[in-house]
Image (cartoon, rainbow, N blue to C red):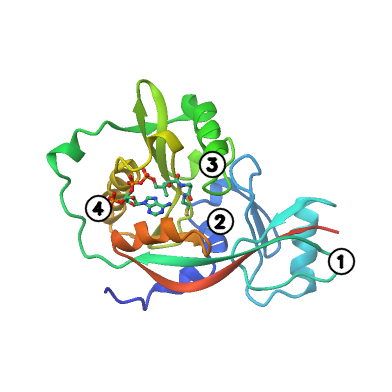
C-alpha cells in the first residue's frame, strides 16, 4: 500500500476542493464556502469553526436552506435543524498501477458524457441512487458512460479534487444492465486517467452499501476511515 502521509487533504475534501481546483465553482464568505447549487450541494467551514464561521455559511446559503456538510465532523449551533445523518467510509486506492484493459474491455464503448447527456444522467441517477447529483455536477470532472442500444446504462464520474487526489463518484449501472462488468470497466478507465495525471483516486461509500464496497475492494481500494455524512437546515 502506498504511503498516506500526504492524505491530510482528505480530512476536508470539500473545503480543499473549493479552495483550489474548484475555486471557479465556489461561493464564499469569510471562512465559509459552498458550491454553486446547480453543481453540488456541499458546503465547508474551517476546522474547529467558531460561531462567526457558521454565521458566514448561514448568510451564504440564506435562511431555511439546505446545508450539506458532507463528512465535516463539526456540528453547527443548535438552531441549525438536522436533516440527515448517514454513516459511510472514505476509501483510497492502494494500487500502484492500473493493469491494461483486456481486448474485450478496451472495445467496450466507454464514452465521455457532456452537457447534452444530462437528462439521461439525471434519469439514471434517479433509477439507481448512487448519491447526490445535480444538473451541473458533471462540470466537476469528466464523466464516462456506456450506452446499450443507444440508451445510457452505466456511468462513473470524477467529483471532489483536493490537492493530489481525485474522488470517483456517481458509480451506477441501470438495474437491467448489472453484472456485465460495466461498473468495473468505467472505474478502471477513471483509475487509469487519475493515476496518469499523477493523482491518487479515493471515494466514499455508504456503510450499508456492502455490495459496492466489495466491488471497490476488489479493484484495490482500502478503507482510510469511517465518516459520518450530515445535512442541516440553516436557521
Ligand atoms: C454497484 C453497481 C454500480 C455495480 O454495477 P455493475 O455494472 O453491475 O457492476 P459490475 O458488473 O462491474 O460488477 C462487478 C462485480 O461486482 C459484483 N457486484 C456488483 N454490484 C454488487 C452488489 N450490489 N452486491 C454484490 N456484488 C455486486 C458483481 O457481481 C460483479 O462480480 P463478478 O465480476 O464476480 O460477476 C450497481 O449495483 C449499482 O448501480 N448500484 C446502485 C448505485 C450504487 O450503490 N452505487 C455505488 C455508490 S458508492
| Cβ at disc 3 under 8 Å from ligand 1 | no
Residue identifier under label 3:
137
* Badge 1 or badge 2: first in the primary sequence: 2
Residue identifier under label 2:
18
Q: Is residue 18 above or below residue 52?
A: above
As helix, strand or loop, the secondary structure at mark 2 comes to: helix
Q: Is residue 67 above or below residue 147?
A: below
Badge 1: how crowded within 10 Å, few (<14), some, or many (20+)?
Answer: few
The C terminus lies in quadrant: bottom right
Residue identifier under label 4:
196
Mark 1 and mark 3: Cα distance apart in space: 30 Å
Residue 178 x %, y %? 38, 40
Mark 3 and mark 2: Cα distance apart in space: 14 Å
Depth check: give the residue in front, 33 or 71. 71
Comparing marks 4 and 1, which lies closer to the viewer? 1
Mark 2 and mark 4: Cα distance apart in space: 23 Å
Depth check: give the residue in front, 189 or 214. 214
* Badge 4 or badge 1: first in the primary sequence: 1
Contact, CB < 8 Å: mark 3 with mark 4?
A: no
Please give the name of the residue rendered at 62% of the width and 54% of the height, measured from the top-left corner: 42
Residue identifier under label 1:
79
Left or right: 168 with respect to 74? left
Amino acid at each position: 500500500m502506498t504511503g498516506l502521509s500526504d492524505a491530510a487533504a482528505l480530512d476536508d475534501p470539500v473545503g480543499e476542493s473549493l479552495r483550489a481546483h474548484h475555486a471557479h465553482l465556489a461561493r464564499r464568505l469569510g471562512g465559509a464556502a459552498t458550491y454553486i447549487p446547480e453543481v453540488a450541494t456541499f458546503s465547508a467551514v474551517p476546522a474547529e469553526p467558531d460561531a462567526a464561521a457558521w454565521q458566514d455559511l448561514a448568510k451564504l446559503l440564506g435562511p431555511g436552506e439546505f446545508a450539506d456538510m458532507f463528512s465535516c465532523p463539526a456540528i453547527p449551533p443548535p438552531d441549525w435543524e438536522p436533516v440527515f445523518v448517514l454513516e459511510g467510509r472514505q476509501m483510497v486506492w492502494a494500487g500502484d498501477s492500473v493493469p491494461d484493459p483486456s481486448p474485450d474491455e478496451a472495445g467496450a464503448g466507454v464514452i465521455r458524457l457532456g452537457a447534452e447527456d444530462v437528462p439521461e444522467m439525471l434519469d439514471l441517477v434517479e433509477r439507481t441512487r448512487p448519491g447526490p447529483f445535480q444538473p451541473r455536477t458533471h462540470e466537476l470532472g469528466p464523466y464516462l458512460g456506456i450506452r446499450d442500444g443507444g440508451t445510457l446504462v452505466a456511468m462513473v464520474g470524477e467529483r471532489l479534487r483536493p490537492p493530489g487526489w481525485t474522488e470517483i463518484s456517481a458509480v451506477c449501472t441501470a438495474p437491467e444492465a448489472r453484472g456485465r462488468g460495466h461498473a468495473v470497466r468505467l472505474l478502471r478507465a477513471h483509475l487509469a486517467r487519475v493515476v496518469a495525471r499523477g493523482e491518487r483516486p479515493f471515494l466514499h461509500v455508504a456503510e450499508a452499501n456492502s455490495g459496492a464496497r466489495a466491488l471497490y475492494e476488489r479493484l484495490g481500494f482500502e478503507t482510510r476511515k469511517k465518516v459520518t455524512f450530515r445535512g442541516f437546515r440553516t436557521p
